[in-house]
Amino acid sequence: MRLMVVAESVRKARGFLNGAKAALNVGEGDSCACLCYHAVFWAAIGILGFVGVRRARWKHDELRQVFGLECIKKRRLCPPELGEWLKELYFLRSDAVYGTELTTEKKAERALRKAMAFVQKVEEVCRP
């Protein structure tokens, strides 16, 4: 059951990454930013499931806090920058959705690189 939760979460994360790449390729920085955040959100849910921490529904702030505590501080499965990226991509997504300025291509590219590295790290840690 635990590995199924992890696999489903990582599959969703990969799907959002694919969407982020496609959005970037057509110049949609805001969409890319949103999809990058959703990719790391689902990857974080996956790794938390891997260590046995589950919720029926995660709130964004709670996910960031529990990820930082369980995966970075307590178990040392992930480097601290992953916690920073999760927070950074959340705020970038918020700016993309609710702000008036468009997400630049440079910011979108940086977000995609971080999201890809985040998901890759989660896949490495959760590999059976």
Image: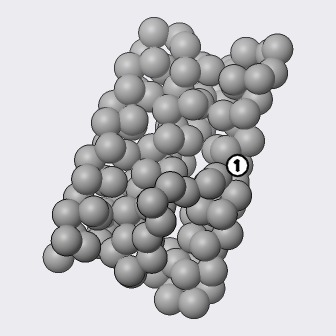
Q: Work out which quarter of the rendered image holds the C terminus and state it.
A: bottom left
> Where is residue 100 drawn, in percent x and y?
82, 14
Which image quadrant is residue 14 in?
top left
> Where is residue 95 drawn, in percent x and y?
76, 29
Secondary element at image label 1:
helix
**On the rendered structure, is 88 left or right of 55?**
right
Q: Work out which quarter of the rendered image holds the N terminus and state it.
A: bottom left
Q: Nearer the viewer, residue 91 or 112?
A: 91
Q: Residue at horizontal 50%, vertical 41%?
A: 38
Q: Please determine whether, in this image, residue 96 is positioned above or below residue 70.
A: above
Q: Residue at horizontal 34%, vertical 75%?
A: 50
> Where is residue 45 drawn, in percent x and y?
44, 61
> Where is residue 69 drawn, in percent x and y?
63, 80
Residue 84 visible (yes or no): yes
Q: Residue at horizontal 27%, vertical 62%?
A: 5
**On the rendered structure, is 57 left or right of 65?**
left
Q: Among all residues in the image, which is located at the extreme bottom?
A: 74
Q: Which residue is mark 1?
A: 88
Q: Residue at horizontal 70%, vertical 25%?
A: 96
Q: How many marks?
A: 1
Residue 127 visible (yes or no): no
Looking at numbered disc 1 in the image, what kind of residue is underneath it?
Glu
Q: Among all residues in the image, which is located at the extreme front?
A: 56
Q: Among all residues in the image, which is located at the extreme top?
A: 26
